[in-house]
Amino acid sequence: MKAMFSGFAAIALIGVAAYFGLHALGLSSEHVFSSPNVRVD
């Protein structure tokens, strides 16, 4: 049971770190997949 909860915590931590890390690098999907004709604020 402890291993399962540790896995859940690791998945949550990796997900949050990836979210903020990719946004900090400017690799969010709104910037990657938008064309020059799209206004992204």
Image: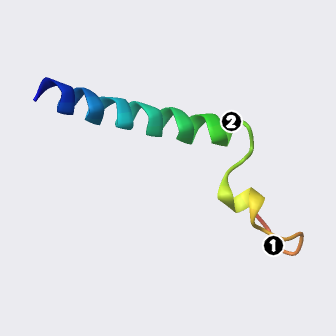
Quarter assignment of residue 32: bottom right
Q: Nearer the viewer, residue 17 or 41?
A: 17
Q: What percent of the width, then of the height, locates residue 20? A: 57, 36
- Distance, label 2 to label 1, CA atoms, is 21 Å
The label number, if any, that marks residue 9 in the structure image: none
Q: Which residue is mark 1?
A: 38
Mark 1 burial class by Cα count in 10 Å: few <14, some 14-19, many 20+: few
Residue at 14% x, 24% y is: 2
Q: Amino acid at mark 2?
A: Ala
Residue at 74% x, 44% y is: 26
Q: In the shown orientation, is residue 29 left or right of residue 31?
A: left
Residue at 75% x, 57% y is: 31
Q: Secondary structure at mark 1?
A: loop
In the rendered structure, which disc, 2 or 1, sits on the residue that comes first in sequence?
Answer: 2
Q: Which residue is mark 2?
A: 24
Residue at 73% x, 37% y is: 25
Quarter assignment of residue 13: top left
Q: What percent of the width, then of the height, locates residue 24? A: 68, 36
Quarter of the image that includes the N terminus: top left
Q: Is residue 29 visible?
A: yes
Q: Amino acid at mark 1?
A: Val
Q: In the shown orientation, is residue 38 left or right of residue 7?
A: right
Residue 15 higher or lower than 10, as above or below: below
